[in-house]
Image (cartoon, rainbow, N blue to C red):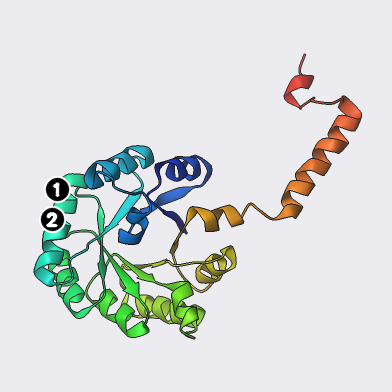
Amino acid sequence: MEILLDSANLKSIKRFGDTLPLAGVTTNPSIIKKEGKIDFFAHLRKIRTIIGPQRSLHVQVVAADVEGILKDAEAIFAEVGEETYVKVPVTEEGLKAIKALKDQRRNVTATAIYTIFQADLAIAAGADYIAPYFNRMENLNIDAEQAVREMAGEIKRSSAQTKILAASFKNIGQVTAALRSGAQAVTASPDVIAQGFAMPSIAQAVADFTHDWENIFGEGQTIASLRK
């Protein structure tokens, strides 16, 4: 299981990089927009510095035609690093680009996936990751859990190396559902990740333990403080 953070916010990436067993960071043009007018490549290099060389960084192209996609990809590899995963939407032009990039043995994440057909094509084209949009699929009355199960089934059937990187979540329940349905990886925003720790019962349990301990050993005392 891989947990990635869907964000370009340096503070959030540092926070959850320290907290989670984080496998990487994903970005897209809409996420970049939230950071305002930035030096794009310099900002991505800062993200790489924060997450280190072992975690994956996924950066989306902007061009829509195959020539432009390949030029965007080349710029990303040159400025951010060859180990970067270039995110390419699974359109007709995008599939051409995915095939070309995999012929070059480049890292590719096939994104903007809404249908099983798109996923099947990206798997066949050799994409390293496919990113189905879980919440957006549900909003279109598509059974996202079943779709992920079928994508996982195709990967197994074809003995592909592709991994499912489920994306687009509105709550932590969807994240859990995607993983239970067969996604090997998920990427979620800082707000969604924070929901996983926000249940009041968790804080109450910790407070109760502290209260019971301090009733015996005194206020502010910890296990470490008992050492002589």
Q: Which image quarter holds the C terminus?
A: top right
Name the side, left or right, on which 153 lies relative to 32: right
Q: Look at label 1 and name its amino acid.
A: Ala
Name the side, left or right, on which 215 lies relative to 92: right
Q: What residue is shown with label 1?
A: 78
Q: Residue at x 40, y 53 (%)?
A: 7
Image coordinates of residue 211 in percent, x first then y, are 85, 37
Name the side, left or right, on which 31 lies relative to 182: left
Residue 218, compared with residue 75, is above or below; it is: above
Q: Quadrant of residue 68?
A: bottom left
Q: Quadrant of residue 185?
A: bottom left
Q: Residue at x 45, y 79 (%)?
A: 137
Dot label at residue 74: 2
Image coordinates of residue 98 in percent, x first then y, are 19, 69
The single residue placed furthest to the right in the displayed view is 216
Label 2–label 1 contact, CB within 8 A: yes
